[in-house]
Amino acid sequence: TNSMYDMNSIGSGVHERTPISARAVAASLQQPRSHFKQTPSNTRRQQHQDNASIQNASQNSTHSDGELGRLVSPPKKNRCTLPVASFSLVVVAVALIVTWQVFPTEEIVVKFLPKFESPASPWIGEEAPGTATSDNDQNNGDGGIDIDIPLENEVPISDATSVPSFMKCPIDSDELCCNGSPQNCELKVNETMFATLHNAMSTEEGDFTFGFNHYKTLEKAMVAGYRGINLDVCNCNGKLQFCHNVCDYGERVPQEVFTNVVNFLKEYPSEVIILIFQATTEKGQIVWNDLYDEMKQVEDFEDMLYVHQGEGKEWPLMGDLVKSNKRIVTFYFNGGTCTDNVCPEPFLPFFKYTAETEYQSANLDELRNIQYSCQLTRGPGGFKGDFFAVNNFVTPPDPEASAITNTQKFLSERLTNCANFNGKRPNFVYVDFWGEGVTSQLVQYANKQMASQKEKEEQ
């Protein structure tokens, strides 16, 4: 016959016979005897070499060490080819997409990221006993108040290294000047409009990690004409800081900020600043007396604080504040406590005096929706407040949106619509990214407009 059978399987319980080429066996037996040493190691090494030809003849054959030596299996092939790798990448990509769409990945991420917005009920505390409501929910914004200020020469604020022309008081004049204009001195504080920094401490320049509301600091904003400063107060490991709800992602030291405010007011003795403090209690309770103690540590700060006579009392003229050098007005909101329930005398509960519009507009379309964004959501009910705050920003902070919301056209329309919707001119115009647009300039012209209107009415 032309084939033999491997009997190595006999005795192992395997009865299958494997055919082997006779020619391969003969070739193996014709090898010189010197190749077969008596030591087991040499014998096996030589058998390994000799059986290469047998392996090529029949890959499925096996032989005993006594007859033919051991046949070696061929090396395993690399199965990671380009088509296999490409297919694996596609599978992984599809799995990631399915996971992102099916599982609540976004909710999980949001859960563990620090929160940068106000809590669901930010008007807690006795400072806000009622929720504000608009007098006419059906008003479409057409009520006769016009804040459509045509700015002939818009002055975008880019660097804030010097006071812009529209905020400069007349040179070589003995006339009293208030917030950059003599006309403003004839306005009461609650008749005046203030360009206001939303979350003023939260800036890129101030090393806030992310979620910041402005690129540049509040000190530069004061030079650029902003006179309202909203600051979040946090208790960071027992120390008061100005932070954006989370201590580890950026802070400002209160005494440092207060020192810079006083220095600004000393350099510009015609200016009045409004400070609006918001309590953030996630890390610890805020005691307003402690913040007042921080103020008292700064030279001349306490002396400049205005003390209002009480709710329902008439507000002074801006000129009176300048002449008396009581040029810092302070408000607080969002809870916090006072020592023995006695708050510092200059501290005024913001939402007892102020009604405010919706503060959570997600995009420009929602801001343009008068019924939604101009409705009053915080403050005394039925609009009995002395002040009116209009929020002119989107949440979360968006510099591209601010580049639109802070323009003359958008601001004029929004302030006019919200004023007519609620029957009152705005006082505090909250903005993000103050370096975008012309907010402080438009506010200045709006104050001049109000002063001129008031003068005509008094004649």
Image (spheres, grey):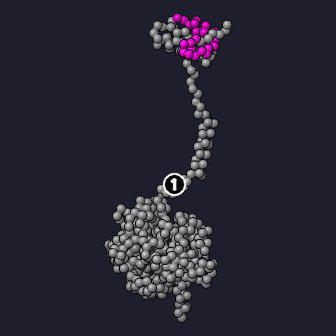
Quadrant for the N terminus in the image: top right
Q: Residue at x 60, y 9 (%)?
A: 25
Answer yes or no: is residue 427 visible. Answer: no
Residue farthest right in this picture = 1
Label 1: how many residues lie within 10 Å, few (<14), some (14-19) or many (20+)? few
Location of mark 1 (residue): 108
Which quadrant holds residue 239? bottom left
245 relative to 446, above or below: above
**What stretch of residues is rendered in magenta?**
7-33
The amino acid type, in three-letter code, at marker 1 is: Ile
Which quadrant holds residue 127? bottom left
| SS at mark 1 in the image | helix
Answer yes or no: is residue 455 visible. Answer: yes
**Could you say where residue 400 lies in the image, as x and y percent from the top left?**
57, 64
Quadrant for the C terminus in the image: bottom right
Left or right of 70: which side holds 298? left
**Could you say where residue 123 lies in the image, as x and y percent from the top left?**
47, 72
81 relative to 294, above or below: above
**Could you say where residue 232 lies in the image, as x and y percent from the top left?**
43, 68
Residue farthest bottom in this picture = 459
Q: Residue at x 44, y 64 (%)?
A: 245
Left or right of 415: which side holds 300? left
Q: Residue at x 39, y 77 (%)?
A: 347
Which quadrant holds residue 57? top right
413 relative to 316, above or below: above
Q: Residue at x 47, y 85 (%)?
A: 188
Q: Is residue 15 magenta?
A: yes
